[in-house]
Image (spheres, rainbow, N blue to C red):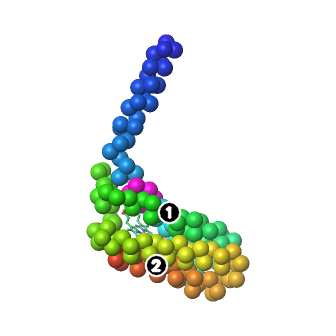
Amino acid sequence: MMVKRWVLAACVAVLAPVAVAGGATDDAIEFRQGVFRALEWNFKEMGAMVQGRKAFDAERFALQAQRVAALAQMPGEGFIKGSEKGDEVQTRAGAKLWYQREHFDRLLQQLAERSAELAVQAAQQPGRDALRPYFAKVAQTCKGCHDDYRERF
Ligand code: HEC
């Protein structure tokens, strides 16, 4: 009984990498989409606070700004070579992203920098009105990149 279990475990260990080998592209796409969704989760609520649709909570805003700053460093890793198209996963990454990669990377860099600046400001809790322009700069970066590099279907 013990032996059989051991053999089974060995088979699983050997086969597992084969089973996921074709999925590296899908993994990368799901990773970047997941990061963007986590960004959105935080950023949406911050937007509601900044625009007065939700009561402003300086601590919550600072926490979310910190999360956004950390997440903003991540999506680039998911845009790996060959991930223009998924196997089983849909992507909305626009075709021109892949031949304007330098510009796209600059926008990602801008997202990271502006998010970091927002987090620094938010940590000082200067109040909603003072944070609004820093929030707006990040929001413009999201929108600008989506206009150019995210398909609309
Ligand atoms: C440098 C370009 C760029 C920036 C900056 C950017 N995005 Fe995106 N975003 C994309 C691309 C490209 C996709 C499509 C990814 C895919 O489907 O593979 C996307 C997808 C998304 C999605 C959909 C994810 C899904 O599940 O399909 C959300 C939500 C999103 N972005 C939110 C944001 C937010 C919020 C910000 C700013 C805080 C932001 N993005 C900044 C390029 C960008």
Label 2: element kind: helix
Pointer 2 residue: 141
Q: Which residues are magenta?
A: 28-34
The answer to whether one can see residue 55 in this image is: no
In the rendered image, the residue lying farthest to the top is: 1
Report the amino acid beneath label 1: Met
C-alpha distance separating marks 2 and 1: 15 Å
The kind of residue on which mark 2 rests is: Thr
The image quadrant where one finds ligand 1 is bottom left
Residue drawn at (46%, 72%), measured in percent from left and top? 108
Name the residue at 35% across, 78% down. 147
Q: Nearer the viewer, residue 18 or 63?
A: 18
Residue 62 included in the magenta stretch of the image: no
Residue 1 appearing in the image: yes
Q: Residues within 10 Å of mark 2 (few under 14, many from 20)?
A: some
- Sequence-first tag of 2 and 1: 1
How many marks can you see? 2
Using the rendered view, name the quadrant where residue 119 is placed: bottom right
Decide: few, some or many residues near mark 1? Use Cα within 10 Å; few <14, some 14-19, many ≥20: some
Q: Position of residue 109 (x, y in %)?
A: 49, 73
Disc ID at residue 2:
none
Please provide percent x and percent y for residue 80. 38, 58
**What residue appears at the point 44 percent right and 75 percent down from the top-left corner?**
106
Q: Is residue 12 above or below residue 130?
A: above
Numbered disc in front, either 2 or 1? 1
In this rendering, position of residue 8 left or right of residue 137: left
User: Ligand 1 within 8 A of label 1's CB?
Assistant: no
Please, what secondary structure does the residue beneath circle 1 have? loop
According to the picture, the residue beneath numbered tag 1 turns out to be 74
Disc 2 CB within 8 Å of nearest ligand 1 atom: yes
